[in-house]
Image (spheres, helix red, strand yellow):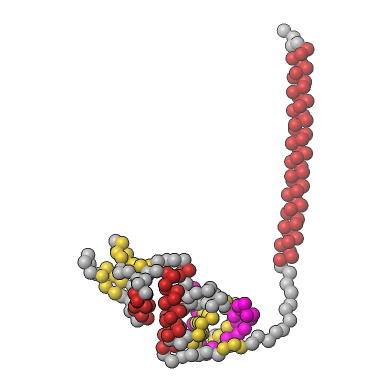
Amino acid sequence: RAPSRAWADRRAGRGARLAVGLRTHRAADLARRGADRTLSRAAGERSRDVTRTIVEPERRTPVIAEPDVLVVGGGAAGIAAACAAARGGARTMLVEAWGCLGGTLTLVTLGGFCGTHMVVDDERLGRVVGGLYLELEDRLAARDALLPPRRHGRILGVPYESASLKLVADEMVAAHGVRVLLHTGAVATQTDGARVTAVIVENKGGRAAIAPRVVIDASG
């Protein structure tokens, strides 16, 4: 039978609302695309701006030290290198970007020395690292900040207290006569062929140069 007039009106109304909705969606989509293009152009302009450069005026950088040995980085390797150089009679300087020595041993609260002992058998452990590390252990033990080696399967670790290690590291380098600059980053070098003749450093005091005879890079 023929559809009623009311049914036809309802269908026409739904069609009209659908058409309005489609037009609204289309307009919103066009606006979004326009905004995306605007953002893309802005990002491209910013990207081009980043590639711009400036020419800095020439400056004279003061040389603040001329040690025999400069160690860059005050982690475990840097502490050992600086103490060994100073113990051998070299005038030694150590620069560290953070506010304490120790690197990951102190800054990330690692909590255990690994690789210092080995498993001999089920009953015995063997020490494989000595030298300056033994001095470090002795100083920590004197502060009651060291525990005996702990075994986890075939892995061995020596637990320590990281805050005490900061103090012990300071004591060690001071005892060996190492001059230390904390909060000081190495930002550039000057070279003569393959030899580093100066290391440029920056800290709150400004920009300066250190001109050592030898540079040890222990920055990690």
Where is residue 33 shown, x and y percent of the image? 74, 46
Q: Residue at x 42, y 66 (%)?
A: 110
106 relative to 11, above or below: below
Quarter of the image where one finds residue 59: bottom right
Of the pair 187 and 23, the residue shown nearer to us: 187
198 relative to 49, above or below: below
Where is residue 4 shown, x and y percent of the image? 75, 11
Residue 87 visible in the shown view? yes
Quarter of the image where one finds residue 162: bottom left
Quadrant the N terminus occupies: top right
Residue 79 visible in the shown view? no
Q: What stretch is highlighted in magenta?
A: 200-220
How many numbered discs sit on the rendered protein?
A: 0
Left or right of residue 173, residue 122 in this image = left
111 relative to 180, above or below: above
Quarter of the image where one finds residue 154: bottom left
Of the pair 70 and 13, the residue shown nearer to us: 70
Q: Residue at x 74, y 9 (%)?
A: 2
| Residue positioned most to the front | 143
Where is residue 156 shown, x and y percent of the image? 32, 66
Left or right of residue 34, residue 102 in this image = left
Left or right of residue 2, residue 62 in this image = left
Majority secondary structure of magenta residues = strand
Magenta stretch: residue 135 in it? no
Q: Residue at x 71, y 66 (%)?
A: 50
Q: Which residue is drawn at 42% across and 81% down?
A: 172
Where is residue 173 shown, x and y percent of the image? 45, 82
Magenta stretch: residue 211 in it? yes
